[in-house]
Amino acid sequence: MADDLDIIGLWEKGKKLNPDIEIDINKTIESRSKGTLFWIKVILNIEFWINVICLPLFIYFLIIQNKDYLWGFSAVIVTIIYLFYYQFLIKQITRFNYTEDVRTSLKKLYGYLRFFVLHYKVVIWISLLIGLIKGFIDDVPKSVTPEQMAEPFFWPLIIGVSAVFASIVGLIMTLLINLIYGRKIKRLKKLISEFSR
Amino acid sequence: MSDTFFNSFVTENMGIISHICRAYSTSEEELKDLIQEVTIQLWKSHGKFKGDSKISTWVYRVTLNVCLGLSRRKRLLTEPLANTDFSEEIDTVEKEQIESLYLAIRNLSESDRAIILLYLEKKSYQEISDILGMTVTNVGVKVMRLKDKLKEMING
């Protein structure tokens, strides 16, 4: 027990010799947070407003101008769903509670980050898939003759090349997302498991 | 909690906040950033404090949540955990021990650092468990192991 007191005693002695940091509290509480959640919220807000801007553009260019109803209405529906989805995510992050115990808070933060990363991956792969389908429907018939299309290896070749190209683009994008958030997610996972053991 | 009370409350608790933040920062600049973030989160969450736990438990929770949750690059330690340029009122042996203690704490994993900091702040196992979300038994086992580890590191 004497040894314990020594460590605590040393800690107390060290504390007394280090002056507290002085900050201007009024100025500080008015300043901007630098936390991870703050930046996720900023990114989500930017994405929300991009979707808000895209909505009338889809209506005007796809539905009114091009009369492309299938793609136009699909784009509008997906954008509206995404607007609600972004609002939900932003609300969840705004409500994040820093007063909960550390393990619970880290678990929630980990959950938000994983969900955030997952939503990007889903968006990337869905966008690539839609791009490929739209390419097949709109561009292939315009640039290839019916005789070429009738060739036995035409469609397997086109689909194969497109799938490989889309997979490479998708994997590069996924890798980039993992590079940005992967380290943070792994660190949180490790911390949660250490507090759980 | 009124604005005036919050100001005096943070000033009173700045010791706790700065000592915990110091253990998780690698430079004075990072230390100030962490303290600023803790103050912002305390301000944002002070309305949620219902008094169902000790006020110190709340401060420790917010401080550690910010320190462990903030995204930072892992940088090499360039500055000591605390100012170890002590005055002459401390003898050389004690000075070395304090320096070793600070260094040992810095070398612990982030989760172990949180546990030992709370122990050094004289928190009971129950309080440490409430702050970190671990079981009391788990806290006890870890504290015992970490105390031995620190002693070993200090004694060389």
Image (tube, rainbow, N blue to C red):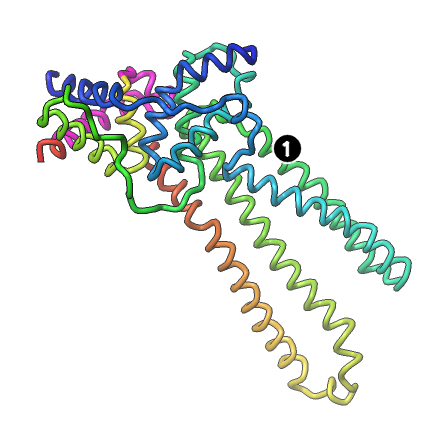
Q: Is residue B131 magenta?
A: yes
Which residue is painted at 51% across and 54% down in the image? A177
Q: Quadrant of residue B88?
A: top left
Q: Chain of mark 1?
A: A
Per the picture, the main secondary structure of the magenta-coloured stretch is helix
Q: Is residue B126 magenta?
A: yes
Q: Is residue B124 left or right of residue A40?
A: left
Q: Is residue A9 left or right of residue A156?
A: left
Extent of the magenta region: B122-151
- Indicate the quadrant containing the N terminus of chain A: top left, top right, bottom left or bottom right: top left
Secondary structure type for disc 1: helix
Where in the figure is residue B30, as x and y percent of width and height? 40, 37
Vertical relation: A15 (above or below) B83: above
Q: Quadrant of residue A135?
A: bottom right
Vertical relation: A146 (above or below) B16: below
Of residue B102 and residue A181, the one placed in the foreground of this image is B102
Where in the figure is residue B49, as x and y percent of width and height? 51, 15
Which residue is painted at 16% across and 17% down in the image? A5
- Name the residue tied to disc 1: A91
Of residue B33 and residue A87, the one placed in the foreground of this image is B33
Which residue is painted at 31% across and 32% down in the image? B23
- Identify which amino acid the numbered label 1 is placed on: Lys
